[in-house]
Image (spheres, rainbow, N blue to C red):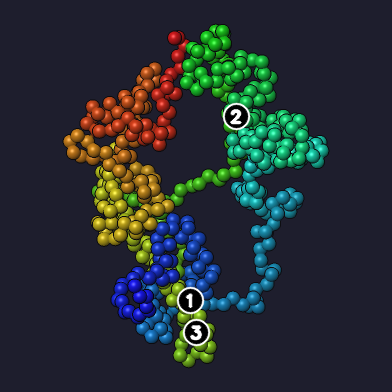
């Protein structure tokens, strides 16, 4: 076979992902808060992009999505007022500034006569950071009279405490990592365990509970005996077995169990520094009369326009250099594309939510039990878009409905067939499992197989393992942990 080089012409179509198209796709999958942050970043980086300052600019903004003409010589955009530049020498005096706004709220009372600070939050509420477990423990370690070697070992122990306050390493690992003796490591573990919160530095829940009982002076009590010898009975609420194992009567055992239940099995969790995540809906669905109205949440989203100051620079009579004009042309084109992409994003979200209302009308009217099975292809075919576009639109976005606030992904779920040929959504099945468990007898709770039989009597095909999977997703304990405590064998 002879190898040779030859030229060949081939005609093919190919989708090119331009930077503008990549930006449009990125904006589509951002949540509202992420979109606000992205727009603010663009406002800082692109001088040709401005925020609307008055309602008179709204009509002008509707026409800002103009691209460059075919020869690329000039960007055709409507006329807007010239950007006003701030002149610091315009007569503004430093004496006119109200320095009272910058006063320290901890000034002497004589300097705070005219201040209405009773309802104002403390500046420390803004500047300070909530301490986590490691910071709290290191603070206690620094106040103790330990040697430098002991502090080094103590800091290593504190650094290996997990979020629950448990120690993840043993004494041998501590000694090897800090070049100290095992005796020193064990002694410092004991010292750390004496710090606040009670139970910190334990290896497991059992040891943590014993440390807390010791702190309460109950080291040799019945509660400590139950934790040491019968903690596995407490997990299944088999209190009769606890009575038999300890040899005490029912009243004494119940009093000791109440003490154990009042303890914190995970003492480090109270010092978690994770901030709560609040959900702000991206879309609101309101029912007005017999119709559902869609309202996009645009709070905090700047209304953008093209800077007229830089458009005038591109005029033919301008003396600006060619390189500067090319730079401004590029920034104007980028600003116009950003405005177009945001408008397209909002229209796409509106179309998707409008389609969801069409498919899930019964859910919006009656609740979760009437949620229908739905896949991305159904909405994509309804509004004439690709499934990947629907997936991006529904990612990281929430909608407020008459039934509550849900992620847009919530409306897409698998189906469970019924004997009559109809299908139920997986969320409807989960809601039914929750109601079955709430109505069960606490003395004899239903097992996963029993719940599956209930569905079978209702004409729904559901396997036991499917019930177990949905039950775990609902954070519902197995039947042996839901059983009411028993005292007699």
The one nearer the camera, 483 or 262, is 483
Q: Is 56 positioned to the left or the right of 261 in the image?
A: left
Tell me the SS state at disc 1. Answer: helix
Q: Position of residue 309 (x, y in %)?
A: 50, 80
Reading the image, the residue beneath label 1 is 331
Q: Is residue 277 above or below residue 230?
A: below
Q: Is residue 292 in view?
A: no
Sequence-wise, which precedes: disc 3 or disc 2?
Answer: 2
| Pointer 2 local density, CA inside 10 Å: few below 14, some 14–19, many at least 20 | some
Image quadrant holding the N terminus, namely: bottom left
Reading the image, the residue beneath label 2 is 204
Q: Position of residue 137 (x, y in %)?
A: 69, 38
Q: Position of residue 23 (x, y in %)?
A: 43, 66
C-beta proximity under 8 Å, tags 3 and 1? no
| Pointer 1 local density, CA inside 10 Å: few below 14, some 14–19, many at least 20 | some
Sequence-wise, which precedes: disc 3 or disc 1?
Answer: 3
Residue at 63% x, 23% y: name it: 210
Give the quadrant of residue 146: top right
Q: Is residue 205 in view?
A: yes
Q: Position of residue 44 (x, y in %)?
A: 54, 69
Q: Report, in whole angstroms, how far the alpha carbon at label 3 lies from the one at label 2.
A: 68 Å
Tell me the SS state at disc 2. Answer: loop
Sequence-wise, which precedes: disc 1 or disc 2?
Answer: 2
The one nearer the camera, 245 or 384, is 245
Q: Report, in whole angstroms, how far the alpha carbon at label 1 lies from the one at label 2.
A: 59 Å
Reading the image, the residue beneath label 3 is 325
Give me the disc on residue 23: none
C-beta proximity under 8 Å, tags 1 and 2? no
Tell us which disc is closer to us: 3 or 2.
2
Residue at 49% x, 63% y: name it: 38
Residue at 38% x, 66% y: name it: 343
């Amino acid at each position: 076979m002879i190898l040779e080089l030859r030229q060949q012409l081939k005609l093919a179509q190919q989708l090119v992902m331009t930077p503008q198209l990549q930006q449009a796709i990125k904006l589509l999958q951002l949540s509202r808060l992420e979109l606000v942050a992205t727009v603010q970043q663009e406002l800082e980086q692109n001088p040709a992009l401005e925020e609307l300052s008055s309602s008179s600019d709204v009509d002008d903004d509707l026409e800002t999505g103009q691209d460059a003409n075919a020869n690329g010589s000039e960007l055709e955009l409507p006329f807007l007022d010239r950007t006003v530049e701030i002149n610091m020498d315009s007569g503004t005096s430093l004496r006119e500034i109200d320095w009272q706004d910058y006063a320290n709220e901890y000034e002497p009372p004589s300097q705070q006569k005219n201040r209405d600070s009773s309802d104002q939050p403390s500046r420390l509420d803004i500047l300070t950071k909530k301490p986590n477990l490691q910071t709290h423990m290191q603070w206690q370690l620094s106040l103790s009279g330990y040697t430098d070697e002991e502090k080094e070992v103590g800091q290593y122990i504190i650094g290996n405490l997990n979020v629950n306050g448990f120690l993840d390493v043993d004494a041998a690992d501590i000694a090897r990592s800090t070049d100290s003796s095992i005796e020193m490591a064990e002694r410092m573990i004991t010292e750390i365990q004496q710090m606040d919160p009670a139970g910190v530095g334990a290896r497991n829940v059992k040891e943590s509970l014993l440390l807390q009982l010791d702190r309460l002076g109950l080291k040799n009590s019945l509660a400590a005996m139950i934790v040491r010898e019968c903690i596995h009975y407490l997990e299944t609420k088999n209190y009769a077995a606890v009575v038999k194992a300890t040899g005490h009567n029912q009243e004494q055992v119940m009093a000791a169990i109440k003490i154990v239940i009042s303890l914190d099995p995970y003492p480090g969790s109270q010092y978690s520094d994770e901030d709560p995540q609040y959900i702000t809906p991206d879309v609101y669905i309101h029912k007005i009369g017999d119709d559902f109205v869609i309202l996009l949440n645009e709070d905090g989203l700047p209304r953008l326009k093209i800077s007229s100051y830089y458009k005038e620079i591109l005029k033919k009579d301008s003396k600006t250099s060619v390189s500067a004009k090319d730079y401004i042309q590029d920034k104007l084109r980028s600003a116009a594309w950003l405005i177009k992409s945001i408008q397209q994003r909002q229209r796409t979200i509106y179309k998707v939510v409008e389609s969801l209302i069409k498919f899930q009308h019964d859910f919006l009217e009656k609740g979760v039990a009437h949620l229908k099975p739905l896949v991305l292809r159904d909405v994509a075919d309804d509004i004439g878009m690709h499934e990947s576009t629907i997936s991006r639109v529904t990612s990281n976005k929430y909608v407020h409905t008459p039934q509550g606030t849900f992620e847009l992904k919530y409306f897409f779920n698998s189906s469970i067939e019924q004997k009559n040929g109809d299908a139920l959504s997986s969320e409807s099945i989960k809601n039914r499992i929750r109601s079955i468990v709430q109505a069960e007898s606490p003395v004899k709770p239903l097992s996963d197989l029993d719940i599956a039989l209930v569905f079978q009597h209702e004409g729904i095909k559901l396997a036991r393992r499917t019930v177990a999977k949905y039950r775990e997703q609902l954070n519902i304990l197995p039947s042996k942990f839901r059983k009411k405590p028993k005292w007699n064998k």
